[in-house]
Amino acid sequence: MQTSPAIPPREDNPCPSPVAIWQQLLTYLLEKHYGLTLSDTPFCEENVIQGHIDAGVTLVNAVNFLVEKYELVRIDRNGFNWQEQSPFLTAVDVLRARRATGLLKV
């Protein structure tokens, strides 16, 4: 009688490093929402990203600091409405970026 393993073998799918994840998300978020590339910001340096991660700074707060410092304007919103539109990113923006970059499995 032949037996099969109870647990199927895992595929060797290495998990990206936190720095690589930040790079992917920053690339997407900066381009989509502000028309910038990663190289337009201090985040083009891996050690800058690692420093933010080590300090416990969230991705949203890191980007929003740049938005405030350089008075960035979001380019992904069309038209005007009665409410002032905030230039800042939200957690929802990051979740959408995770989905768009394949980092969030649905």
Image: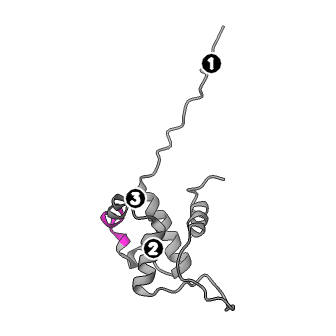
**Where does the magenta region start and end?**
43-50
Asked if residue 104 is among those painted magenta in the image, a careful observer would answer: no
Mark 2 or mark 1: whose residue is earlier in sequence? 1
**C-alpha span from label 3 to label 1:** 39 Å
Q: Is residue 79 above or below residue 105?
A: below
Q: Residue furthest top?
A: 1
Task: Give the residue number, with chain letter if any, for mark 1.
Answer: 4
> Which residue does the image show at 55% across and 56% down from the upper left?
103
Camera-nearest label, 3 or 2: 2
Q: Position of residue 75 (x, y in %)?
A: 57, 84
Task: Give the residue number, with chain letter if any, for mark 3.
Answer: 19
> The disc labelled 2 sits on which kind of residue?
Val
Q: Position of residue 79 (x, y in %)?
A: 67, 91
> The disc labelled 3 sits on which kind of residue?
Val
Task: Give the residue number, with chain letter if any, for mark 2.
Answer: 63
Q: Position of residue 5 (x, y in %)?
A: 59, 20
Mark 3 or mark 2: whose residue is earlier in sequence? 3
> The disc labelled 1 sits on which kind of residue?
Ser
Rendering quarter of residue 89:
bottom right
